[in-house]
Image (cartoon, rainbow, N blue to C red):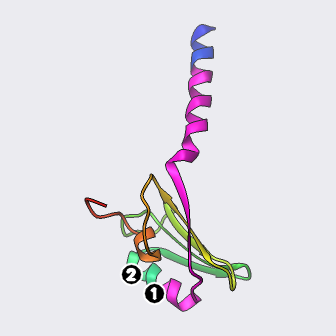
Amino acid sequence: MRTFTALLLLSVAFAAGAPALARDLTFPKMSADQLKAACDKAGGKFSQDSTGNGCGTDCQGKPGTDCTVFCPGDQKCTAQVIGARRPHSVADALTKPTRGN
């Protein structure tokens, strides 16, 4: 029973800390064509629907969901990146940071 309790507490602690591994950032609004160009350059997958435009990458040049950017209509874009990094552009948000950043 102690082992189960310890595992349960460890799982809860890890789950509570997991959101700290991601960071949400806001970028100026951009057109679907601009986001698609940045997405293609980063090797991501571009998507578009009635709510807006998005792009997801694995942060290493392939489609995925580790680094994402979503631009809803005429509003500012939101990026979600892993870790404590603070990219300065949508292109930086979709790619792996260079050493020293």
* Residue at mark 1: 37
Q: Residue at x 53, y 91 (%)?
A: 33
Q: Amino acid at mark 2?
A: Lys
Q: Amino acid at mark 1?
A: Ala
Q: Does residue 90 appear left or right of residue 13 in this picture? A: left
Question: Can the viewer see residue 3 in this picture?
Answer: yes
Q: Are marks 1 and 2 in contact (CB under 8 Å)?
A: yes
Label for residue 41?
Answer: 2
Kindly report the secondary structure that dominates the magenta region of the rendered protein.
helix
Circle 1 crowding by C-alpha within 10 Å: few under 14, some 14–19, many from 20: some
Question: Can the viewer see residue 94 in this picture?
Answer: no
Helix, strand or loop at disc 1?
helix
The magenta stretch spans residue 11: yes
Q: Residue at x 58, y 88 (%)?
A: 32
Q: Nearer the viewer, residue 58 or 96?
A: 96
Label for residue 65?
Answer: none
Q: Residue at x 47, y 75 (%)?
A: 90
Picture coordinates of residue 6, whole percent (x, y): 58, 16
For the N terminus, the image quarter is top right
| Vertical order, 33 against 66 (above or below) | below
Q: Nearer the viewer, residue 49 or 14?
A: 14
Magenta residues span 7-36
Q: Does residue 38 appear left or right of residue 49 in this picture? A: left
Q: Residue at x 59, y 78 (%)?
A: 47
| Residue 48 lies in quadrant | bottom right
Picture coordinates of residue 89, whole percent (x, y): 44, 75
Mark 1 vs mark 2, CA separation in Å: 6 Å
| Vertical order, 99 against 19 (above or below) | below
